């Protein structure tokens, strides 16, 4: 007979955070088929940013001459960088699993296997047991995709973001496939640490970002590594000594390849048809409503398996919504996806929230734009920054901010006042004039951009 639980959570990333004292009265199961803690902790945003910081230091040393300080990078100890990263992360993952499996969580059962539905709210855990439950939360995440190119097969010479950070040695050369945020971040990391980088982009660098940002980053990238835009490799040849990529009829050799061409949700691995959960035919994401409910009563979904944003802070927000709705089924709350920010931790750093100019035009939304360069404020002078800028879109009738796009130092931090303003309905004029802006600090570039937005004419 199948074992019954009150709640089954598929995935141990953000889904694991649902479990807390408020649910101690429930018999809960967590089903996990990989490393405990999910993508962000183990192979995603946390370890990558721990690599980005030493890369930033190395790149900063090389650019010191513009400030009158001559510096160089004497050596890069890749094993030391790797071991610092995973020496912290691996114990967190292991302790998280041990905690859930231990005496402090007597109401939680952890199943180690790949969950797959075999009936209505009936799950084969992949561990030899089949379980049923009144309620499910599908938080199974996503995975890296690998394009179908002859000879391109994962292995010691071909990696995704899941494995590239655990290399034994720093490669002398690397080919990076893709033009999104993962590709941009790793291109920065490997270039800054001394690798010969060749990045191959099918269409446009960071094409989901505002076009002005994409153009600016492309210009910055070509100064640091070989960037081949508008190309698709036709074949790969993998050997013990390295990799050969065939591109436009010519061979390009490297030690390793990083495939960063996108990610896909893991819903296709769950046999969702067996329990009736709807999946978007185009994207593969589980379809949910504003309450994070699927079309099957009692089944919720959150994070990368259902969200087109595929960002950890979005998954965490959705997790809090699901947790509330599990505890308060008669007083449920909705997810708020109006103003989802994102950052690219490359060099220069990038951050964005809200509409791009192309999106505003396509949707027929009236807007005005304002732009201010980092070099136009004192903190930018201090850095001799000549390429960073802030671009803001606003509603000319109300002065409300519609979108913001930043490329430059600490962009992911500098953008936060604009995210707050959008969430709380503050106008550009009020944000600029009704608070102090520390002088001379980087956020002054935000203040100056806001001051360029015309104040709405009121009756």
Image (cartoon, rainbow, N blue to C red):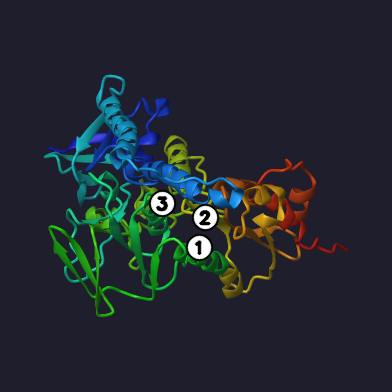
User: Which quarter of the picture shows residue 406?
Assistant: bottom right
Q: Residue at x 62, y 49 (%)?
A: 383
Depth order, front residue of 341/79: 79
Q: Position of residue 365 (x, y in %)?
A: 64, 70
Q: Label 2: which residue? A: 348
User: Which quarter of the picture shows residue 15?
Assistant: top left
The reply to whether discs 1 and 2 touch (Cβ–Cβ < 8 Å) is yes
Q: Is residue 279 left or right of residue 362?
A: left
Q: Position of residue 438 (x, y in %)?
A: 73, 40
Label 3 CA crowd tier, 10 Å (few <14, some 14–19, many 20+): many
Query: Relative to 410, is 20 above or below?
Result: above
Label 2 CA crowd tier, 10 Å (few <14, some 14–19, many 20+): many
Q: Label 3: which residue? A: 192
Q: Position of residue 447 (x, y in %)?
A: 73, 51
Q: Label 1: which residue? A: 220
Depth order, front residue of 149/189: 189
Q: Residue at x 88, y 63 (%)?
A: 459
Depth order, front residue of 187/366: 187
Q: Residue at x 51, y 40 (%)?
A: 331
Q: Is residue 426 left or right of residue 152?
A: right
Q: Position of residue 397 (x, y in %)?
A: 76, 65
Q: For the N terminus, which image quadrant?
A: top left
What kind of element bears circle 2? loop
- Residue 136 visible to the viewer: no
């Amino acid at each position: 007979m199948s074992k019954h639980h009150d709640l089954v959570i598929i995935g141990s990333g953000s889904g694991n955070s649902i479990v807390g004292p408020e649910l101690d009265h429930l018999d809960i199961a967590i089903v996990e088929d990989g490393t405990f803690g999910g993508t962000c902790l183990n192979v995603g945003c946390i370890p990558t940013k721990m690599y980005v910081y030493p890369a930033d230091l190395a790149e900063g040393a090389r650019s010191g001459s513009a400030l009158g300080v001559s510096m160089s990078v004497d050596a890069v100890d890749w094993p030391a960088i790797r071991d610092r990263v995973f020496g912290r992360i691996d114990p967190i993952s292991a302790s998280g699993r041990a905690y859930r499996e231990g005496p402090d969580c007597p109401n939680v059962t952890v199943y180690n296997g790949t969950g797959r539905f075999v009936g209505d709210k009936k799950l084969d855990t992949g561990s030899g047991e089949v379980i049923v439950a009144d309620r499910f939360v599908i938080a199974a995440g996503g995975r890296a995709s690998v394009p179908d190119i002859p000879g391109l097969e994962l292995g010691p010479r071909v990696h995704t973001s899941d494995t590239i950070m655990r290399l034994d040695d720093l490669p002398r050369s690397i080919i990076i496939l893709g033009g999104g945020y993962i590709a941009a971040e790793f291109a920065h990391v490997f270039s800054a640490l001394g690798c010969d980088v060749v990045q191959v982009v099918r269409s446009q660098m960071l094409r989901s970002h505002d076009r002005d940002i994409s153009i600016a980053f492309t210009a910055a990238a070509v100064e640091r590594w070989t960037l081949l835009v508008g190309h698709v490799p036709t074949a790969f040849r993998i050997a013990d000594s390295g990799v050969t990529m065939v591109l436009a009829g010519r061979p390009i050799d490297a030690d390793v390849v990083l495939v960063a061409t996108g990610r896909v949700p893991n819903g296709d691995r769950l046999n969702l048809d067996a329990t009736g959960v709807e999946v978007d035919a185009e994207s593969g994401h589980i379809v949910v409503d504003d309450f994070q409910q699927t079309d099957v009563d009692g089944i919720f979904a959150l994070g990368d398996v259902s969200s087109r944003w595929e960002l950890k802070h979005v998954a965490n927000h959705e997790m809090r919504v699901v947790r509330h709705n599990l505890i308060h089924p008669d007083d449920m709350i909705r997810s708020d996806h109006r103003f989802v920010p994102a950052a690219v931790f490359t060099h220069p750093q990038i951050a964005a929230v809200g509409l791009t100019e192309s999106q505003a035009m396509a949707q027929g939304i009236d807007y005005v734009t304002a732009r201010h360069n980092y070099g136009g404020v004192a903190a930018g002078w201090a850095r001799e920054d000549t390429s960073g800028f802030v671009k803001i879109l606003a509603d000319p009738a109300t002065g409300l901010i519609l979108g913001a796009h930043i490329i430059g130092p600490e962009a992911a931090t500098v953008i936060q006042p604009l995210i707050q303003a959008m969430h709380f309905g503050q106008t550009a004029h009020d944000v600029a004039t009704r608070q102090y802006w520390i002088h001379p600090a980087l956020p002054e570039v935000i203040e100056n951009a806001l001051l360029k937005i015309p104040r709405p004419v009121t009756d």
